[in-house]
């Protein structure tokens, strides 16, 4: 397979993730869209790493995975905490930002 096919797939995945973040109202679904965008970036890093024949893209993808794992832990903890106190995970509910 050519590198172009991987990059096209990464662009499609990133577009799906971006659309999900902009359109959906449930914070868990928005969170999944962000994760999809991070995975698309990883795919692009790995495709460029393969194209150039270096390990730089693989190293960048590894660091993106580490950041994504930390984001999952913190983000889900915040979402669960908000759900326990407010019984909603809607991003449109502005009362979540007030205390």
Image (cartoon, helix red, strand yellow):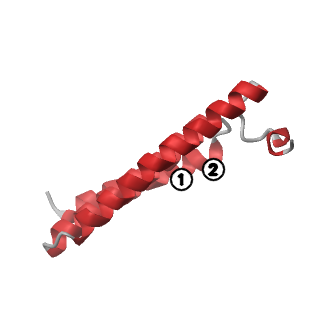
Tag 2's secondary structure? helix
Q: Decide if residue 26 is on the left or right side of residue 88.
A: left
Position of residue 81 relative to residue 31, above or below, is above
Position of residue 96 relative to residue 70, above or below, is above
- Say few, some or many: other residues with alpha carbon within 10 Å of mark 2 (under 14 / 14 to 19 / 20 or more): few
Tag 1's secondary structure? helix
In the picture, residue 80 is in which quadrant? top right
- Residue at figure coordinates x 59%, y 48% from the top left: 21
**Residue 2 horizontal/vertical position (percent):** 16, 62
The quadrant the C terminus occupies is top right
Position of residue 56 relative to residue 41, above or below, is below
**Residue 7 horizontal/vertical position (percent):** 30, 62
In the picture, residue 97 is in which quadrant? top right
In the picture, residue 5 is in which quadrant? bottom left
Q: Label 2 vs label 1: CA separation?
A: 6 Å
- Residue at figure coordinates x 74%, y 24% from the top left: 87
Question: Can residue 12 be seen?
Answer: no
* Closer-to-camera residue (25/82): 82
Q: Are marks 2 and 1 in contact (CB under 8 Å)?
A: yes
The quadrant the N terminus occupies is bottom left
**What residue is shown with label 2?**
22
**Residue 15 horizontal/vertical position (percent):** 48, 54
Q: Decide if residue 30 is on the left or right side of residue 42.
A: right
- Residue at figure coordinates x 77%, y 41% from the top left: 92
**What residue is shown with label 1?**
18
């Amino acid at each position: 397979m050519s590198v172009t096919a991987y990059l096209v797939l990464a662009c499609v995945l990133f577009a799906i993730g971006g659309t999900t973040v902009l359109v959906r109202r449930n914070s868990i679904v928005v969170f999944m869209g962000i994760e999809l965008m991070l995975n698309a970036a990883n795919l692009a890093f790995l495709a460029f790493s393969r194209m150039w024949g270096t390990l730089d893209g693989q190293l960048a993808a590894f660091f993106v995975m580490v950041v994504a794992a930390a984001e999952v832990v913190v983000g889900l903890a915040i979402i669960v905490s908000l759900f326990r106190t407010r019984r909603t995970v809607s991003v449109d509910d502005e009362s979540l930002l007030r205390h």
